[in-house]
Amino acid sequence: MTKPRGTGAAPARRLRILIAEDNPVNERVARTLLEKQGHTVLVAHNGREALAVAQREKLDVILMDVQMPEMDGFAATAAIRDMESGTGNRVPIVGVTAHATARDRRLCLAAGMDTYLSKPIRPEMLFAAIDEVIPGRREGVAPAAPAPTDRSLATVAVLDEAGLLEVVSGNSDLLRELAELFLEDSPERLLEIRKALDSGNLAALQRAAHTLKGSASSLCGKRTAELALRLEELADTRDLPAARLSYPALADEVVKLQRALVLLAGRAKR
């Protein structure tokens, strides 16, 4: 099993890494963590872009979000493996998934990914996953973050401040940037959710709730992430009446998280 290393440890070598991720908060977190380690980072916002980058660039590792628009991570990985067929080249691909389940691991490996990493992205797990897939350094599957066992939100803080400060390694500028990204992005996601609820578009509802869940989870907003997950699950089970009833609590929680992020960023700036 790969031993996770901290954010301050120097990497064994500098790498060219592609991040395929459509969520701006998740992408910014991963990019900053990798660039601080001295790696060169390229970014794609959907599977088609990832495939195009893989065709023209020499890459050491790809971080592939499995759920993206236009072409998802599974299809993009399969296309990259087809492209590599007969060339003798194989770029390591780390699947990034919001669900730490055995089924997701099987899907990632079946698509041609080398391992997988569960969201929210945490420094030690990210580095362990990359270390694992670099040739000559594979030591086993990177451990996934444990799935929550208690769905009650009564004792959960709006924002896990200590957790978020760990994610940004105490970098107040990055903290402020992530807070601003969430302040810009979350109202758009709520609007998408509201429109999907009004029109009964369950696919759009699931996508918007999934995106909001990912952003909140990366920022350690556990209550918002959990409420967004519940809405995503209701869309998946096609329970539109229950989804409509669940929306107000999510909207209220997003506002609370926005305020908590602003307050934390303000304190960190001093």
Image: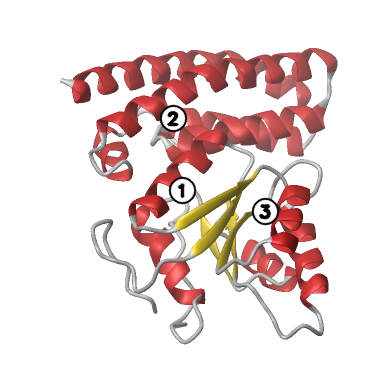
Provide residue 35's location: percent of width, then percent of height: 40, 51
For image coordinates 78% across by 50% down, the residue present is 48
In this figure, which residue is indicated by the disc labeled 1? 30
Question: Callout 2, which amino acid?
Answer: Arg
Provide residue 84's location: percent of width, then percent of height: 77, 75
Give the mark, 1 or 3, whose residue is nearer the N terminus. Answer: 1
In this figure, which residue is indicated by the disc labeled 3? 66
Give the mark, 2 or 3, whose residue is nearer the N terminus. Answer: 3
For image coordinates 51% across by 56% down, the residue present is 118
Question: Callout 1, which amino acid?
Answer: Ala
Element assignment for label 2: helix
Element assignment for label 3: loop
Q: Quadrant of the N terminus?
A: bottom left
| CA neighbours of label 2 inside 10 A, class few (<14), some (14 to 19), many (20+) | many
Which residue is at the front of the view, 238 or 103? 103
In this figure, which residue is indicated by the disc labeled 2? 223
Q: Rounded to the nearest whole Å, what is the CA distance between mark 1 and mark 3?
A: 15 Å
Element assignment for label 1: helix
| Vertical arrangement, residue 108 with respect to residue 180, above or below | below
User: Splitting the image into 4 quarters, where does residue 196 fall?
Assistant: top right
Question: Callout 3, which amino acid?
Answer: Val
Provide residue 80's location: percent of width, then percent of height: 76, 67
